[in-house]
């Protein structure tokens, strides 16, 4: 609840100043709403990325194993087989 001194100060403020304060408050509320919407959008995208990562996680082991067999400057047949689209693992 506003103290009597702040209430007295509010009564001394002119209409134009009150309108300016309201416009500033409205702008800040809009900014906060936009930020909240951006956070919600980012959350949805993060959830989608996490789901995609879960779907791909069985393949990550294959890629890691293939990378371990990779030698700089050459690719062994094991790596090619690990990336084969016909691989039914």
Image (tube, grey):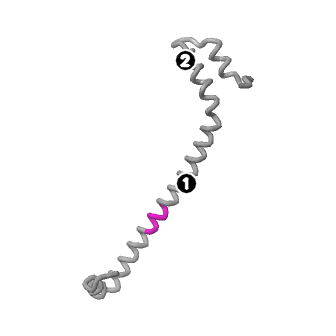
Highlighted magenta segment, given as a residue range: 29-34
Circle 1 or circle 2, nearest the eye: 2
> Which residue position holds label 1?
41
Residue at left offset 60%, top offset 24%: 63
Please check the rendered image and state whether residue 15 is part of the magenta-colored stretch, yes or no: no
Dot 1 or dot 2, earlier in sequence:
1
Left or right: residue 54 versus residue 85 is left
Left or right: residue 81 versus residue 9 is right
Residue 54 found in image quarter: top right
Please check the rendered image and state whether residue 30 is part of the magenta-colored stretch, yes or no: yes
Q: Quadrant of the N terminus?
A: bottom left
Label drawn at residue 76: none
Nearest the viewer among 16 and 68 is 68
Q: Position of residue 67 (x, y in %)?
A: 56, 20
| Above or below: residue 23 compared with residue 59 | below
Residue at left offset 69%, top offset 22%: 84
Alpha carbons under labels 1 and 2: distance apart: 37 Å
Q: Position of residue 86 (x, y in %)?
A: 74, 23
Residue at left offset 44%, top offset 69%: 29
Residue at left offset 49%, top offset 62%: 34
| Above or below: residue 87 compared with residue 75 | below
Label 2: state its secondary structure. Answer: helix
Left or right: residue 61 versus residue 9 is right
> Which residue position holds label 2?
68
Label 1: state its secondary structure. Answer: helix
Left or right: residue 85 versus residue 29 is right
């Amino acid at each position: 609840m506003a103290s009597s001194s702040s209430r007295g100060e509010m009564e001394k403020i002119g209409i134009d100043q009150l309108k300016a304060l309201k416009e500033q408050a409205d702008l800040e509320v809009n900014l906060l709403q936009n930020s909240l919407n951006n956070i919600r959008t980012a959350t949805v995208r993060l959830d989608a990325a996490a789901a995609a990562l879960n779907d791909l996680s069985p393949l990550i082991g294959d890629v890691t194993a293939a990378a371990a067999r990779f030698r700089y400057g050459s690719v062994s047949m094991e790596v090619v087989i690990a990336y084969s689209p016909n691989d039914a693992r």
